[in-house]
């Protein structure tokens, strides 16, 4: 605080000097002393610059009370690199000015707040109408309240927590540390995270272009939670010619994810690999392709493995000079699921004796969707769904949706969706959803 | 067990990738990436041929809503220095890019991360309690500060200091270039101020709050905004207020950024006999605006012409 006061006093003083100089310079001017004038002008400008520099310093001091991890670069006139001051008491709210350490009393709490993580809350309310006995949804539900806590941990890492409060309980949706300063351009994550399998699996509810998730996700990739597990992720950008962006992500997980993977013992790990290829076609359009593979043990036990293969593609168009008014995204994912299971499930009860050779259940599904933004706040979209059932691939579900989305502002969103699902049992479900989402707090970045 | 084997193979593959990827050996030139073209232009002025500089966003694009394209990562992963506007202007797109770049040198707090706002005069810093009822407010102050040539000079000075810190061998070169830039800017500024002198104190309305620094430097008086609140598109009732304001105060000039829809501004103009003036907020907004000087040349040119014609 002492330092801050000094800086402010100095700023005021300098401003005063600048004013005084200006004032005194006018009357005592003899006729045309242009050179003198220019020199004075220069001096005033220099003083102005110093005041601005000091103001910048004050802003920095106000926003970063404890130097250390996030100490910003010093002002240009200051020595180029100040030695980092150890901050054992940093969190407790100690301010360091030069070599002198100033302990703060009551102000300590306020100072420590500056290091609090960015907090955001996103509410997701869904109302639904229509009849669907196979996959029922309540008439009104506060589907999810997602609390995000995000901050830089230290010079080498940042951390992100997303805690999802549902109607019945609390769930750590994601919580991981990202090591951002690894050698050779590697980025590693450790914690619980959504696996990099395809596109939809990586996305939180509130950034989906629909009120629900596609049938193929519901059926084959674990539904709303998806492949979401504790483990380690490593990603690396692979040098590629012709401005292609190539990135490989490799992930190892405990092996427990919804109804996809089940670890019946410690060695039943699961793995996910994803290769992403991206290219800017023009300034306004780009192509985003990916292939994914995932493997883990399933609920039949340690000897039974499920393999998932995925292909995803997205084409985006956004005219940069009108980027806030018009855009179009087409996206699609194809997913194959191959599940080892006891013979009993592979063929019908009558023809197969119990526990013969392990069988395979092969299921396939896809979705394709397009979203067009036709005004600053308005989007319209459509989606086609098709998916086999995971445990009975003879049954095939099909569906289609129409979506209309309105953004009152960047921080809230109202969406209507009509969905028709033709279930494998030859049953049609017509449903209407109305979704309201709203965000508080820190302005989160938009995923791409 | 088979799975473990696969994981090992994966690890070995990754290791191979690491070894064969081109080493980040120290090149001769510093590689600088800036978020906006204006910062790139200023960096180029100071760094000359000792650096390579690239901007992420285009000059005709709304800098609040840039998409974090993976292709930007290709630029960021090899950068020695990242210069950003700061004040949360890039909050919607830059943080995830920095995280995913895998480049430890440009992480916030690292020597290769420079927030240019620290060098400049910031206007419209909100006081007191802030809510989003006021729209998409910038809690740290107005980030469009580069549109004041005085701030341009200060940023150049700050960049020169940073480049010197990263490449001490070329200190004299950077200093000389920075001083030369300052001299040329001072001369150009004199010319711009002279051009604008007849219109000092003129009242204008603007679409977004992009122009406070520009207005302050060139003596314009911004009395209203076509957006009812920052980031909120025009509403009919607010548009009528603006029309009445313009009629009452005999305001003829509406300043618009190139990335906003001209429908409302045009209809306001037709109701008030005003003039829609599309000013470029950034270098590269038009193909002919190739550097920081041409940015003001263009804007002042367009603006004085409009003032002249609506007199």
Image: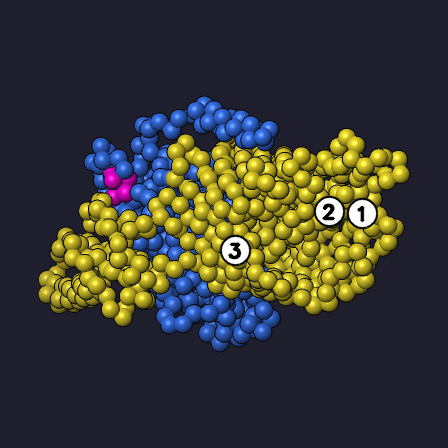
Chain colours: A yellow, B blue
| Vertical order, B108 against B137 (above or below) | above
Left/right placement of residue A270 relative to residue A363 reads left
Assess whether mark 1 and mark 2 are in contact (beta carbons under 8 angstroms).
Answer: yes
Label annotation for residue A219: 2
Which quadrant of the view contains residue B23? top left
Q: Which of A14 and A20 is in front in this view?
A: A14
Element class at badge 3:
strand
By secondary structure, the bulk of the magenta-drawn segment is best described as helix
Where does the image place residue A308, in percent across and percent down from the top left?
Answer: 67, 37
Residue at image coords 57%, 51%: A323
The answer to whether dots 2 and 1 both sit on one chain is yes
Assess whether mark 1 and mark 3 are in contact (beta carbons under 8 angstroms).
Answer: no
Element class at badge 1:
strand
Residue A57 visible to an observer of this rendering: yes
Residue at image coords 57%, 60%: A170
Left/right placement of residue B84 relative to residue A336 reads left
Element class at badge 2:
helix
| Camera-nearest label, 2 or 1 | 2
Where, quadrant-wise, is the N terminus of chain B in this rendering? Answer: top right
Q: How far apart are marks 2 and 1 (CA)?
A: 9 Å
Residue at image coords 45%, 47%: A177
Disc 3 target residue: A162
The chain holding disc 1 is: A
Disc 1 target residue: A397
The chain holding disc 2 is: A
Q: Nearer the viewer, residue A283 or B96?
A: B96
- Residue pushed farthest front? A354
Q: Distance between the residues labelled 2 and 3?
A: 25 Å
The segment highlighted magenta reads B160-165
Residue A286 visible to an observer of this rendering: no
Mark with earlier residue (2, 1):
2
């Amino acid at each position: 605080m002492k330092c801050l006061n000094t800086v402010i006093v100095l700023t005021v003083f300098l401003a005063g000097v600048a004013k005084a100089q200006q004032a005194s310079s006018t009357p005592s001017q003899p006729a045309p002393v242009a050179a003198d004038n220019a020199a004075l002008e220069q001096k005033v400008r220099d003083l102005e610059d110093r005041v601005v520099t000091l103001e910048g310093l004050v802003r920095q001091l106000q926003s970063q009370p404890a130097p250390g991890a996030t100490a910003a670069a010093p002002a240009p006139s200051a020595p180029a690199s100040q030695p980092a001051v150890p901050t054992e008491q940093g969190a407790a709210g100690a301010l360091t000015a030069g070599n002198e350490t100033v302990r703060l009393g009551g102000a300590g709490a306020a100072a420590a707040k500056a290091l609090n993580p960015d907090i955001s809350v996103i509410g997701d309310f869904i109302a639904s109408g229509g009849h669907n006995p196979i996959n029922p949804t309540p008439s009104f539900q506060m589907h999810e309240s997602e609390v995000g806590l995000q901050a830089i941990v230290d010079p080498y890492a940042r951390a992100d927590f997303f805690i999802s409060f549902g109607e019945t309980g609390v769930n750590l949706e994601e919580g991981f540390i990202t090591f951002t300063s690894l050698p050779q351009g590697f980025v590693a994550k450790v914690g619980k995270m959504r696996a990099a399998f395809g596109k939809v699996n990586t996305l939180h509810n509130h950034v989906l272009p629909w009120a629900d998730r596609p049938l193929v996700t519901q059926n084959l990739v674990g539904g709303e939670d998806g492949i979401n597990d504790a483990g380690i992720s490593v990603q690396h950008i692979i040098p590629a010619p012709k401005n292609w962006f190539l990135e490989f992500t490799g992930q190892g997980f405990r092996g427990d994810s919804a109804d996809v993977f089940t670890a019946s013992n410690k060695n039943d790990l699961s793995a996910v690999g994803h290769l992403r290829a991206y290219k800017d076609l023009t300034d306004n359009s780009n192509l985003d392709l990916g292939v994914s593979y995932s493997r883990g043990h399933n609920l039949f036990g340690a000897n039974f493995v499920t393999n998932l293969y995925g292909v995803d593609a997205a084409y985006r168009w956004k005219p940069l000079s009108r980027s806030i008014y018009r855009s179009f995204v087409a996206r699609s994912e194809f997913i194959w699921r191959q599940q080892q299971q006891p013979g009993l499930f592979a063929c019908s009860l009558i023809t197969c004796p119990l526990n013969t050779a392990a069988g395979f259940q092969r299921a396939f599904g896809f979705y394709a969707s397009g979203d067009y933004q036709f005004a600053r706040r308005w989007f319209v979209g459509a989606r086609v769904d098709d998916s086999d059932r995971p445990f009975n691939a003879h049954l095939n579900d099909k569906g289609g949706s129409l979506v209309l989305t309105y953004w009152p502002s960047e921080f809230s969103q109202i969406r209507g969706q009509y969905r028709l699902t033709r279930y494998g049992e030859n049953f049609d479900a017509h449903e209407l959803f109305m979704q309201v989402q709203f965000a508080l707090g820190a302005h989160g970045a938009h995923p791409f | 067990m088979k799975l473990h084997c696969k994981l090992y193979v994966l690890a070995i593959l990754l290791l191979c990738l690491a070894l064969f990827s081109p080493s980040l050996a120290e090149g001769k030139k510093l590689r600088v990436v800036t978020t906006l073209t204006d910062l790139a232009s200023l960096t180029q002025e100071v760094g000359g041929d000792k650096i390579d500089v690239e901007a992420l966003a285009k000059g005709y694009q709304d800098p609040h809503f840039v998409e974090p394209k993976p292709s930007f990562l290709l630029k960021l992963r090899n950068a020695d220095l990242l210069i950003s506007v700061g004040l949360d202007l890039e909050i919607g797109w830059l943080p995830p890019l920095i995280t995913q770049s895998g480049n430890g040198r440009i992480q916030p707090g690292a020597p290769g991360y420079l927030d240019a706002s620290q060098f400049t005069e910031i206007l419209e810093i909100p006081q007191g309690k802030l809510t989003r009822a006021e729209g998409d407010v910038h809690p740290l102050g107005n980030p469009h500060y580069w549109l004041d040539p005085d701030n341009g000079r200060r940023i150049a000075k700050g960049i020169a200091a940073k480049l010197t810190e990263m490449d001490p061998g070329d200190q004299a070169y950077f200093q000389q270039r920075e001083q030369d830039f300052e001299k040329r800017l001072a001369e150009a500024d004199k010319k711009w101020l002279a051009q604008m002198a007849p219109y000092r104190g003129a009242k204008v309305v603007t679409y977004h709050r992009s122009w406070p620094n520009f207005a302050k430097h060139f003596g314009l008086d911004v009395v209203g905004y076509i957006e009812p609140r920052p980031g909120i598109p025009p509403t009919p009732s607010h548009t009528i207020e603006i029309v009445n304001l313009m009629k009452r105060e005999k305001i003829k000039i509406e300043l618009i950024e190139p990335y906003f829809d001209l429908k409302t501004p045009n209809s306001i103009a037709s109701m008030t006999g005003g003039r829609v003036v599309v000013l470029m907020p950034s270098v590269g907004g038009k193909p002919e605006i190739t550097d920081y000087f041409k940015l003001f040349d263009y804007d002042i040119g367009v603006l004085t012409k409009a003032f002249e014609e609506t007199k």
